[in-house]
Image: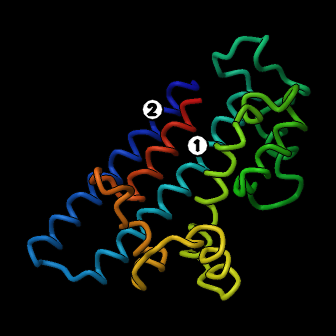
Amino acid sequence: MQADVLKRFQRHLERIEMTRTRMDSLLSDGQIVLRDLESVYEALFLRAVTSFEAFLEELFISILQNKTRYSQRRVSLRMRAISSAALLDILLQGKDYMQWLPFNATEQRAYLYLRGGKPFSELTDGDKSMMKTISTIRNAIAHRSDFAMKQFEMKVVGSQALLPRERTPAGYLRVVVSSNNTQTKFESYMGELSRLSAG
């Protein structure tokens, strides 16, 4: 089950990347304008992050239903539910949905239901920092509030030397990571989501 959940998520990331590549080509060919491409970057980033949240939820529930292939020494349950419906009632606690990001929401839930919170508690400090950055960008795109944009400016952009257009979420995602590389920040974040999901 874990492999199936992971494959579905990673296939979704591959489709997102194919769409991004096609849209970059359309801009290069003059068939769309930069504003169109920036809208696509934002939409694809949101889709990737919400897919990652869905992946976390599906993996978490499959672990609690004993449908995963982790060794018992690594992952063990702190509770068992009598049915899938009962499990969802317990997890939802009267809410309409479960929050998975920022990632500390996932960790807190994992510690309640899994011994030591594993495997969700195994992220390094660097991984957690990456997840905070991804969540901050996601919030700046999704909310556009003054607070979300200030958090993006402060926690993501910081003191980086960027052009004014690159200091927006869409512009930032299109920035090339380094001078000896053609990978954009968008591609880098997609790679990080793929790596984190495989952990």
The x and y percentages for residue 125 are 72, 42
Q: How many marks?
A: 2
Residue at image coords 10%, 78%: 30
Which percent across, then down, holds residue 37?
Answer: 29, 74
Question: Which amino acid type corresponds to the residue marked 2 in the rendered image?
Answer: Lys
Secondary element at image label 2:
helix
Q: Where is mark 1, residue-wise? A: 55
Which residue is depicted at the point 42% across and 85% down?
Answer: 164
Which of the marked residues, 2 or 1, is nearer the chain's N terminus?
2
Does 79 appear above or below 175?
above
Q: Which residue is depicted at the point 29% across and 80% down?
A: 36
> Which amino acid lies under the numbered mark 1 shown in the image of this protein?
Phe
Residue 70, image quadrant: top right
Nearest the camera: 54 or 25? Answer: 25
The one of 46 and 186 positioned closer to us in this rendering: 186
Horizontal arrangement in the rendering, residue 156 relative to residue 151 (left or right): left
Viewer-nearest residue: 136 or 7: 136
